[in-house]
Image: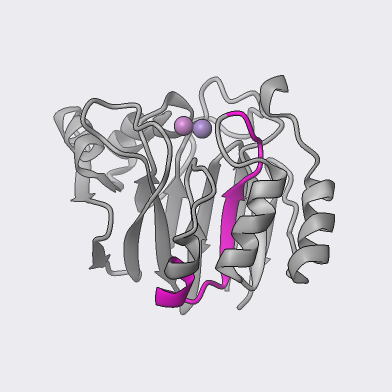
């Protein structure tokens, strides 16, 4: 069984046995204040892009824990220069780690770092395929991603303004056809205030796919 823990905004972890993957560890200055960067433990940190609400506390957590940072080449270079263990990848690439495979997917968004590109990830962990889109606009090739890697769980932004809003994320769910969806990247600041219940209702109507609403600081089990 995999445990999904939500730290609020776009920061979450997936834990299975002795493996914890931490995604976009924005903890300092995260208004949800669910954890201190000094207390989080993980084996790997996956960073989707260089904006401060995603790169966040990556360097301090990686240096303290010895976790390997899995990210695009430009961000990996920045982290390595600051003393982190890194595994550089890029969009379209796949690699098999000890816990399972990671595919780096495109995202339509700013990179937050010179020469970089925003990304998402498809992670295979304990026989479960999880797609984290990162910050992105809706794009039609989400249908292609799900054809390549049938998706058990999709983790998608719904906050609008910087990323997909509710209606575009509903369309993303129709393209991805995942077994379950978790919405993130909303209600962190007034600019991205959205109702996850509205998203849940619209996904139910459009695609009959369950939307799991996870509160910041809450953990839930992910079953296939
Ligand atoms: Ni961003
Ligand atoms: Mn963001």
Residue drawn at x 46%, y 79% as measured from the top left: 127
Which quadrant of the structure image shows residue 58?
top left
For residue 2: magenta? no
Tell me where the magenta segment starts and ends, as one range.
145-161
**Outermost residue toward the front in this view:** 140
Instruction: Where is residue 167? Give x, y as percent.
Output: 71, 47
Q: Classify 113 as above or below 159.
A: above
Instruction: Where is residue 148? Give x, y as percent.
Output: 40, 75
User: Residue 213 vs residue 35: left or right?
Assistant: right
Instruction: Where is residue 134? Give x, y as percent.
Output: 47, 45
Comparing 24 with 219, the one in front is: 24
**Quarter in which the C terminus is drawn:** bottom right
**Quarter in which the N terminus is drawn:** bottom right
Which quadrant of the structure image shows residue 180?
bottom right
Residue drawn at x 74%, y 69% as measured from the top left: 207
Q: Is residue 16 visible?
A: no
Comparing 103 with 55, the one in front is: 103
């Amino acid at each position: 069984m995999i445990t999904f823990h939500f730290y609020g905004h776009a920061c979450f972890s997936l834990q299975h046995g002795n493996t914890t993957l931490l995604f976009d560890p924005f903890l300092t200055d995260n208004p949800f204040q669910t954890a201190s960067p000094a207390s989080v433990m993980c084996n790997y940190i996956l960073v989707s892009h260089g904006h401060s609400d995603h790169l966040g506390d990556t360097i301090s957590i990686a240096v303290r824990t010895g976790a390997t940072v899995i990210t695009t080449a430009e961000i990996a270079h920045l982290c390595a220069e600051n003393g982190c263990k890194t595994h550089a990848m890029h969009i379209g690439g796949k690699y098999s780690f000890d816990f399972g495979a990671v595919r780096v997917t495109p995202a339509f968004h700013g990179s937050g770092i010179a020469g970089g590109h925003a990304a998402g990830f498809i992670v295979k962990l304990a026989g479960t395929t999880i797609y984290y889109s990162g910050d992105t606009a809706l794009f039609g090739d989400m249908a292609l991603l799900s054809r390549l890697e049938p998706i058990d769980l999709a983790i998608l932004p719904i906050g609008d303004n910087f990323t997909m809003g509710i209606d575009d994320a509903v369309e993303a769910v129709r393209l991805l056809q995942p077994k379950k969806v978790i919405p993130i990247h909303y209600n962190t600041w007034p600019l991205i205030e959205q109702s996850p219940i509205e998203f849940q209702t619209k996904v139910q109507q459009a695609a009959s796919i369950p939307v799991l609403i996870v509160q910041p600081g809450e953990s839930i089990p992910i079953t296939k």
